[in-house]
Image: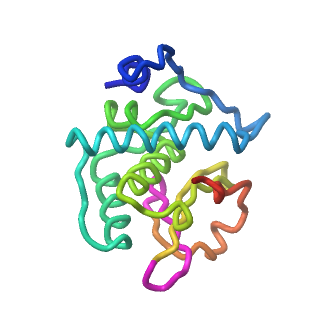
Amino acid sequence: MKFKDLLKLRGFGWSLSNVLWQLDWDKPSKTWLKDYLDKNVFLAHVFLNNNQVPKFIGHRDDIVKAIYSWILENIEYKTDLKRFGKKEMWEDIDEVLDSKAADCESMSTLLFALARAHNVSPLQIRLVAGKVGVGHCWIEYRTDKSQKWQVYDCAMRTRCSAYDTKYKNKWFKVTDYI
């Protein structure tokens, strides 16, 4: 079920289309990102409750690793240019799950939303955009065990320290998301 249909069912009476973001001319505002993430966390809760995505159990660190692994196994990396003919498009997780394909920010949003729906604290997980050769997006998660930030990069299939020099050029972090 699409988010706009859920909104109609819940009585909001309006629909939301995809928001385009051109990396060349603008960065999203914190308000836009918060709304985008709120919406996708809501969708993740709906999908978990309807058994449309797996429910993972265990320690938070293990749950985040399991979600990351599930995304790598079930979602294929494809650029927005290949999929939509557009340079950049931030998809909602329902579209990612329907198509089983996404680029870096859509895969990162899926990981973020599913982790939050599994009760991972907003103080432990953040969506990050920056430059890793090119404009890129990934997740940073602060582990319970070591209390150190770890990168979970679905698009590049990488898990490493957030202090790895490859991930040092950050444009923004959504750290105040609640």
Residue 36 visible (yes or no):
yes
Which of 22 and 116 lies nearest the eye of the viewer?
116
Residue drawn at 45 percent across, 79 percent down? 144
Q: Point out the residue furthest to the front here.
A: 11
Residue at image point 68% right, 55% down: 130
Q: Residue furthest left?
A: 51
Dominant secondary structure (helix, strand or loop) of the stretch shown in magenta: loop
The verdict on residue 127 being magenta is no
Q: x, y percentage for residue 129?
A: 65, 53
Judging depth in this view, the residue of 43 and 10 nearest the camera is 10
**Relative to 34, is 69 on the left or the right?**
left
Does residue 132 appear in this view? no
Q: What is the magenta range? A: 144-157
Task: Answer with the quarter of the image where residue 28 lies.
Answer: top right
Residue that lies at the very extreme toward the top in this rendered image: 13
In the rendered structure, the answer to whether residue 91 lies left or right of residue 95 reads: right
Q: Residue lying furthest right in this view?
A: 25
Q: Is residue 155 magenta?
A: yes
Residue 56, placed above or below residue 19: below
Q: Residue at x 39, y 23 (%)?
A: 10
**Left or right, residue 167 beside residue 98:** right
Q: Position of residue 57 (x, y in %)?
A: 24, 65
Quarter of the image with the N terminus is top left
x, y percentage for residue 62? 32, 71
- For the rendered model, the colour scheme is rainbow
**Residue at x 54% of width, y 43% of height:** 37
Q: Is residue 14 shown left or right of residue 20? A: left
Quadrant in the rendering for residue 171: bottom right
Q: Is residue 126 above or below residue 53?
A: below
